[in-house]
Structure formats: structure tokens, C-alpha cells
């Protein structure tokens, strides 16, 4: 510890999540796996072990080695340490504790809300989104999280009231207009928002503009938008580390752009590349997003036989994707396979 006067945690965000591939049976101890995760975290962030300032452990099999003991064993000098032996619920428990300790920290609250989204606890995520908006009524993240959860629960009326908020992000407003099938409005909203976005964000907006134009029957305009999206994603891929998570997402999105252009071979190849680079078996948080993109690719190509099995699996998977029955019923991207009986069964409202 170089100084007794430590830097505060203000404006610190979680930026490099690390996932170690799941192994059902292992001869290694829980302590070994924790050490491997720390090693991967250090390698991916570029920091040194001495820079680690906080350490939290969740394990049913670490025995008497608490967070304090393991911190000492790994040679860490931390000012915050915790042990939360709650298995899969540990992330939510830790984030809830963080929000309780620092209720005005919107980064903590946003992380908790998104974790609830990932495990499909939409009503709990709404509560946290309301907390964020109590702290800051103009917070675009809180507005976006609340809007998404209302849509995922099928409450379009309440979602429309949120979208009317002048602080709502352009993507949330465009998405709401899309599911209401106001395609000219989608093009207008997203077109005006292009100037304020990064290149990768622009590419995603071009994807939605392409879909809106396509569904409106404007073939030439749709092709132009999808071509612009493809060009932006290709440009970003040229700058990205080839084996990193961001590159996997770029390949998936490039595949969606190619599908919009009816280039089936290139679309499927890019989508599969994204899935291979970031498989759900190794990254259960981001991996399902690559599968969701693959389902969109097949849907845009009108290939229900390949799209629906993916959707059927993702509907039952805890992950931060849009693959939930209410959104499947609403989103026009699924229109090409919507009349398939298997899709109709998938999105049918379940009676209690």
C-alpha cells in the first residue's frame, strides 16, 4: 500500500468481466479456480496484482478459506474484502449490498438492474430503475432500463409514457417506434441521432434503419442502410483485436447486415464466427447475445428451421438478450418466421 490516503471509488465502473469456462468435474480446488480467475482478470485489464483494491469470494467448496484468507494467500493488499457464499445469487446479493451502502451511486444501481434483467427478474429490475430515476430523473440509463423491462413484460402503455420523456435515448425511442411499426418514425428518429453516436453505435442504428425501410417496402433505401452498416462493422473489425469479445460482437452484427442484404452465405459465416469466438458454454453472459444475432440472421433469411431452435433455447436461458416471449411477439425482425406454428407456440402467452 503506497499511501494511507486512498483514491475514492467515485466514477469507478465494472469494465472487464472475466469468465472461466465451466467444468463439471475437476481435480483442482476452488482456491485454484479463484486464482485462475484472478490471473485472467489481471491479464485482461493490464493491471498488476498490487493494484487490486477489492476482493469478494463466492464458493460452497472453499472450506475455511474466506475472502480474508485468500486475499492474504494471493498476496493482495485490499481495503475492501467480502465473502458471500450464496452461489449463483452472489452477484445480486453483492450488488444489492453495494446499492444499500451507496444508494446514490447510479453505476452500482445500473449494474444491479442489468443483472436482474439477465436472470429475467423484470419486476425487480423495474424497482431498481425507479430507484435510479428517483436519484436522477433525467438519467438516460435508468429510463432505458425501465423502458426495456416494461416492454419485456408487455406493458406498452407504460413504456410509451417513458419514451415520451425528453431525456430518453434515441435508441430506446427508435426501438419503441419499431415495435409499434411506425417505420417512418424509426427512420426519422435514428437518422437524426446518427451524428451523436460513435462509429459502432452508428452501425447498429443503420441496422435498425435498414429493417424499418425493409418492412416499409422501401427496398433501395433498406439496401443502402444495410450496406452502410456493413461498411461500419468492417471498419471497426479492422481496428479490433481479432480474438477479443468486441470482435465477436462485430462479426455477429456484420452477419445481420449481410442477412439484410440477402447475402446468405456471408451472413451465416459471420454469425457462426461470432458464436465460435464467444460461445455460451464459455461466456454465459455475452455468448447468448451471439446466438440471438444468429437467430436474427436466420429469421431475416426466412430460415425458420434454423432460427426457431435457437430461440427456443434462448427463451429459457438467463442472459441479457431480447429473446423473451413479449418482445418476440412485438419485434418486426421475426416477421419472416412469425406464421410458423413453432414460433407461434414459442411466443404464446402462458395461462396461469
Image: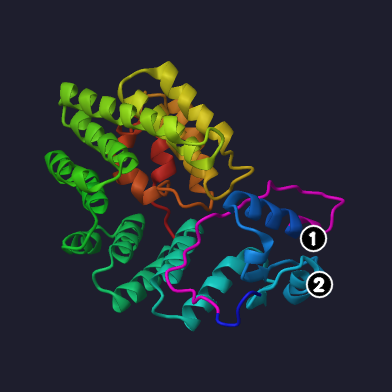
Sequence-wise first label, 2 or 1: 1
Q: Residues within 10 Å of mark 2 (few under 14, many from 20)?
A: some
> Which image quadrant: the N terminus?
bottom right
**Rendered image quadrant of residue 152:** bottom left
Of residues 54 and 59, the one nearer the viewer is: 54
Of residues 77 and 195, the one nearer the viewer is: 77
Q: How is the image coloured?
A: rainbow
Answer whether labels 2 and 1 touch (C-beta < 8 Å): yes
Q: Main secondary structure of the magenta part?
A: loop
- Please, what secondary structure does the residue beneath circle 2 have? loop
Which span of residues is magenta-colored?
6-33
Q: Residue at 23% of width from left, 23% of height from top?
A: 223
Answer whether residue 311 is visible to the viewer in this image. no
Q: Residue at 37% of width from left, 30% of height from top?
A: 235
Answer whether residue 95 is visible to the viewer in this image. yes
Q: Which mark is residue 65?
A: 2
Spatial CA span between label 2 and label 1 = 10 Å
Amino acid at each position: 500500500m503506497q499511501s494511507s490516503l486512498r483514491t475514492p471509488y467515485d466514477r469507478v465502473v465494472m469494465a472487464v468481466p472475466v469468465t472461466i469456462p465451466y467444468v463439471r468435474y475437476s481435480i483442482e480446488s476452488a482456491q485454484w479456480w479463484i486464482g485462475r480467475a484472478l490471473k485472467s482478470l489481471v491479464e485482461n485489464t493490464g493491471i498488476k496484482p498490487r493494484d487490486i483494491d477489492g476482493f469478494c469470494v463466492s464458493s460452497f467448496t472453499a472450506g475455511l478459506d474466506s475472502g480474508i484468507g485468500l486475499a492474504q494467500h494471493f498476496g493482495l493488499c485490499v481495503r475492501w474484502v467480502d465473502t458471500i457464499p450464496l452461489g449463483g445469487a452472489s452477484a445480486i446479493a453483492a450488488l444489492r449490498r453495494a446499492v444499500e451502502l451507496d444508494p446514490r451511486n447510479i453505476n452500482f444501481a445500473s449494474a444491479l438492474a442489468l443483472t436482474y434483467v439477465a436472470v429475467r427478474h423484470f419486476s425487480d429490475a423495474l424497482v431498481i430503475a425507479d430507484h435510479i430515476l428517483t436519484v436522477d430523473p433525467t438519467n438516460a440509463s435508468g429510463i432505458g432500463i425501465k423502458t426495456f423491462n416494461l416492454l419485456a413484460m408487455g406493458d406498452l402503455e407504460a413504456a410509451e409514457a417513458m419514451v415520451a420523456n425528453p431525456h430518453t435515448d434515441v435508441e430506446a425511442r427508435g426501438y419503441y417506434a419499431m415495435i409499434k411499426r411506425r417505420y417512418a418514425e424509426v427512420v426519422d428518429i435514428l437518422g437524426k441521432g446518427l451524428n451523436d453516436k460513435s462509429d459502432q453505435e452508428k452501425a447498429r442504428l443503420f441496422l435498425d434503419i435498414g429493417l424499418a425501410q425493409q418492412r416499409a417496402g422501401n427496398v433501395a433505401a433498406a439496401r443502402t442502410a444495410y450496406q452502410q452498416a456493413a461498411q461500419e462493422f468492417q471498419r471497426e473489425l479492422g481496428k479490433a483485436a481479432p480474438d477479443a469479445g468486441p470482435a465477436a460482437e462485430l462479426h455477429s452484427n456484420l452477419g445481420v447486415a449481410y442477412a439484410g442484404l440477402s447475402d446468405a452465405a456471408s451472413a451465416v459465416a459471420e454469425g457462426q464466427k461470432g458464436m465460435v469466438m464467444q460461445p455460451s458454454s464459455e461466456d454465459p453472459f455475452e455468448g447468448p447475445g451471439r446466438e440471438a444475432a444468429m437467430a436474427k440472421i436466420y429469421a431475416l433469411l426466412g430460415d425458420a428451421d434454423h432460427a426457431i431452435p435457437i430461440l427456443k433455447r434462448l427463451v429459457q436461458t438467463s442472459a441479457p438478450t431480447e429473446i423473451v416471449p413479449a418482445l418476440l411477439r412485438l419485434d418486426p425482425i421475426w416477421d419472416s418466421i412469425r406464421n410458423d406454428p413453432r414460433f407461434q407456440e414459442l411466443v404464446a402467452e402462458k395461462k396461469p
